[in-house]
Amino acid sequence: MRLGPLVLLSTSLAACAAPAHLAHRSPISGAPSALLTPEGRPSPLPSLDSAGAAAGVDGEAVAASARELVGRPHVPSDDGRFPDDCTGLVRAVYSRHGVDLMREGAPAGGNGVAAIWRYAQRHGSLHRDAPVPGDIVFFTETYDRNRDGRDNDGLTHVGIVDRVDEDGTVHVIHRVARGVVSYRMNLARPSLRQDASGRVLNDWLREGKKSRLAGELFAGYGTVGKQ
């Protein structure tokens, strides 16, 4: 399996009106429990009520910081503050830019990815389209977190948008079992691995009996700013 037991991440920003260049985005406003797994069953996600994006963090700079770590086998954390998993990578990168994504702690019974999601919900913007470099990307059901063999694990993985190609393919930097890597995700064709020319549109984010491509496990984007 290319993706080990990882958890998802989220971002933070001050609550205020969305800047003009983000006004066209479609916010996530429905109850996340309405989101479905690839098999069509409800996936238990935290509730959503996004507050709107704020200025403060340079997304291009965030993406550049994440890009510097691609190829490393572990998340750098000299002081031990960040776990060596997907949430640790996102937290470490955002920490460089003055944002503590775990400032409010994790909800009771929740994981680090859910904590970042809630942080973005309270202090930023959660949306499903128009990603920009530096945005946080959330995924569901990337592994069987509770080991019951069912798709009921909700948010399980997180990464950072590096760039977006002209055809809409999003390059996501994240921490997987083999280290910090860059994967591709195309939400226009989420179930298609390659196009007719052989160009990869979606990398495998879950392998095994329930193999899934990145686009199939997408949950949402988070745009954050400084508090």
Image: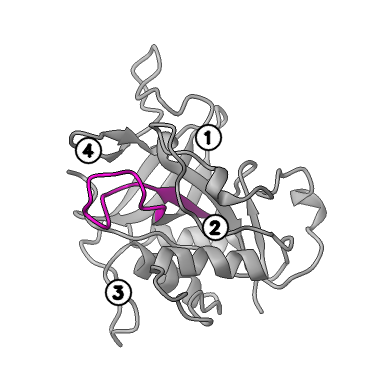
Which callout, 3 or 1, points to the residue nearer the camera? Answer: 3
Are the residues tagged 3 and 1 within 8 Å (C-beta)? no
Give, as a three-letter code, the residue at label 4: Glu
Q: Secondary structure at mark 4?
A: loop
Residue of label 4: 207
Query: Which residue is labeled 2 in the image?
Result: 134
Q: Quadrant of residue 99?
A: bottom right
For marks 4 and 2, give the one nearer the viewer. 4
Say which element carries label 2: loop
Of pointers 1 and 2, the one earlier in the residue sequence: 2
Residue 172 lies, in percent from the top left, at 43, 47
- Look at label 2 and name its amino acid: Gly
User: Could you give the CA–CA distance between mark 4 and mark 2, rounded to whole angstroms?
Assistant: 27 Å
Q: Using the image, determine if residue 214 lies above or below residue 45.
A: above
Residues packed near mark 1 inside 10 Å, few (<14), some (14 to 19) or many (20 plus): few
Q: Earlier in the sequence, mark 3 or mark 2?
A: 3
**Given the image, on which type of amino acid does mark 3 rest?**
Pro
Give how far across and how far down residue 40 sits, in percent. Answer: 44, 32
Query: Mark 3 = which residue?
Result: 83
Q: Are marks 4 and 1 in contact (CB under 8 Å)?
A: no
Give the overall secondary structure of the magenta segment: loop
